[in-house]
Each structure stands twice: as structure tokens, then as C-alpha cells.
Amino acid sequence: MTDPMIKVSGAVSDMGSSTTTKAGQLIQLFEDLKKDAMAIAGEAWAGQAQQAFERAQAQWTVKANGLGNAHSEVGSAVVNNVENLINADIRAAGFFGG
């Protein structure tokens, strides 16, 4: 059995940062879509359909925020782990006088 090799490039850290950025953009897209939908409906829209839309929209917002938060957490975890790996590599180099 061969020992596993870990190789981390800047692309991994960039992917983590990009995931975090995209999470914020995703949440903003959902907010923009919600705002546009409400603008189309206007203030004249009332009744059961409007109430059902508001309930659905509230659930949609919770799910969209959850998805965005999950992306953000994954991105942050990737960035943090890359930083930890780089720091561990630097410390390991110190054992060899590096």
C-alpha cells in the first residue's frame, strides 16, 4: 500500500474563496428575484394567492439562505484547511533546517 500524497496548489485556495464569493452572489440573486416578483405583483395583488405566494416565498428565502450559507461554510473550510496545511508544511520544513 502506498502512502497518500497531499498536494495543494493555489487553485484549491482560490476555489474556496470563489465558493464563498459565489454563496453571497447566490443569496443576492434570490433576493433580487424576490424583489422583482413583488414588483410585478404590485400593491394591488391581494387575496389567497398573494398570501400563498408570501408563504412560499418565505420558505424559499429560508432554503436559499441555507444553500448560500452552506456554500459559504464550505468555502471558508477549504480556505482555512489550505492555510493550516501550508502552515504545517512550513513547520515540517523547520525539522530539516528549512
Image (cartoon, helix red, strand yellow):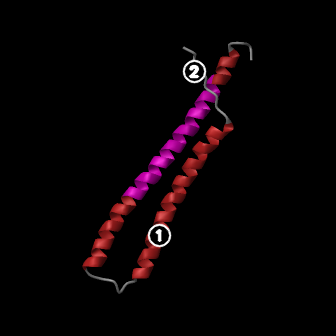
The residue lying at 31 percent from left, 77 percent from top is: 50
Q: In this view, does 56 lie to the left or right of 65?
A: left
Q: For mark 2, does the 10 Å Cα neighbourhood hold few (<14), some (14 to 19), or many (20 or more) residues?
A: few
Q: For the view shown, which residue lies furthest in the right direction?
A: 98
Quarter of the image where one finds residue 13: top right
Vertical position of residue 38 compared to residue 73: above or below = below
Query: Is 67 positioned to the left or the right of 46 in the image?
Result: right
The residue to which callout 1 is attached is 33
Q: What element carries label 2?
A: loop
Question: Magenta includes 87?
Answer: yes
Question: What amino acid does circle 2 point to?
Answer: Pro
Q: Residue 4 carries which label?
A: 2
Q: Quadrant of residue 38?
A: bottom left
Mark whose residue sits in front, 2 or 1:
2
Q: Spot the residue most to the bottom.
A: 44
Report whether 25 appears left or right of 69. Answer: right
Main SS category, magenta section: helix
Q: Is residue 10 above or below residue 90?
A: below
Magenta residues span 63-88
